Amino acid sequence: MWLNDPGARAAFETADAEVRYLEEAGFAPEAVARVQRDKLDRLWDRARHVPYYTGLPGVAERDLARLPVTGKDVLKARPADFVRADLPPIAKYYESSGSSGRPTPTPRLAEDTITNVIGVSALWRRALGDEPSRVAALLPSDVVPVCDFVAATCEYLGHALLRCYPFSLGICDWDRLEALFAGYRPERVFAAPGVLAQWTRILKSRGTLAETRASVRTVLLLGEVSLPGQRRRLARDWGADVLDASYGSTETGTIAATCDRGSLHLLPHGHLLELRGADGAVRPLAPGGAGELVDTTLNNYARPLLRFGTGDRVDLPAQPCACGLPLPTLRVHGRGAERVPVGAAELTEHLVGSVVYDDPRLTGYLIQLRDDRARLVVERDVDVEAPDAELTTAVARRFAAAGVVFDDVVVVGQLPATSKSGGSQKNWKRTNVVTVR
């Protein structure tokens, strides 16, 4: 990675030594705290060159507790104010997907990418294995960093990678993808849940799922929300371990990553994380805690973020993960702003998806809004023969138990591709919620 850049080489050596130190220490809290202190000290040096932070309380004093929380709306409205005034030439330029508003420009230095990749590798090594393996990434690689991130992590860990995004028209369609899997025989697959669900349906309809999945041992989902029901269904269909690979954003980098047991572990060696409660108070993370996740990005070099309100509601399970890592785990419950009112209820991507995918016979959904009416359209899997009435009655009953009543529920054999092809570009309120005129 950028071997001709002395700064990049130095960043690589530093990040590599850091993660080896943490792994040898078993990610003991005192070792993690030491890394956090050192990185926060250097972050203050970068932050004083950021126009937005100049003059804010706590910055001159290097006292994070005095700094106010900055919301995503401020970053999106004033992105240039968060970029360092002394910024050297950038290595890469991305924009966020805009899934919670307009896209945000995100310049990155080599140091940004290197520290993020190596920081995540300690967790992903557990899921990908120590021995070199063949990896396929069914993810876009355009204005968002997700596939570049997967590629760099595989390079660092020593795995081969095939990029094959099937919604790239004229480059890699479903026929090409099936042929690639037959020849390459990947053992690990990274994919967005909707993309993999759509391909699974196609393989089932062709009768070629069994041979296509034969080499696959692990599926890692990322690029959009991944729900337990989706993971269970895909695990059954692919005969593989299916894990929620990571949590984070283009703005913050990766905040949490999966272990081999499927838990999302926070990465405190790259982030200093807090929780903001309903009362507005910001508190340190603690097992059993819940609230909005507030992030200070220790690995952001081009655009540091201090006490950044992610807008995501999370909780931290009280029980440690069975994998033995002492790093805290979290569960993500979605963004508070991503809500759609239906009657007396408010729908979120997590709520709707959790109810729909609780039935393994369903592979997708669309919410149609017209005036004050709401219609739910669900997609049956290609190998399901149950009557429509049985499926609609079952899903309506589960929604009623969750306090949601739709005016109509219908079943279709195929939803529009836009509800599946989003990957990291997906905006739930654009692809799964439609206003009908």
Image (cartoon, rainbow, N blue to C red):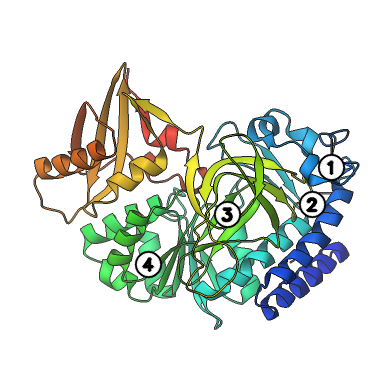
Characterize the local packing of mark 2: few (<14), some (14-19) or many (20 or more) Cα atoms within 10 angstroms.
Answer: many
The alpha-carbon separation of the residues under discs 1 and 2 comes to 8 Å
Q: Earlier in the sequence, mark 3 or mark 1?
A: 1
Q: Earlier in the sequence, mark 2 or mark 4?
A: 4
Identify which amino acid the numbered label 3 is placed on.
Answer: Val
Instruction: Give the structural element (helix, strand or loop) at label 3.
Output: helix
Residue at 61% in and 77% down: 158
The disc label shown at residue 179, or none: 4
Instruction: Give the structural element (helix, strand or loop) at label 1.
Output: loop
Whether the residues at callouts 2 and 3 have beta carbons within 8 Å, the answer is no
The residue that disc 1 covers is: 84
Characterize the local packing of mark 3: few (<14), some (14-19) or many (20 or more) Cα atoms within 10 angstroms.
Answer: many
Tag in front: 4 or 1: 1
Identify which amino acid the numbered label 1 is placed on.
Answer: Arg
Q: In the rendered view of the protein, which quadrant contains the C terminus? A: top left
Residue at 21% in and 53% down: 361
- Measured as percent of width and height from the top left, residue 432 is found at 37, 36
- Measured as percent of width and height from the top left, residue 329 is found at 54, 61
The disc label shown at residue 146, or none: 3
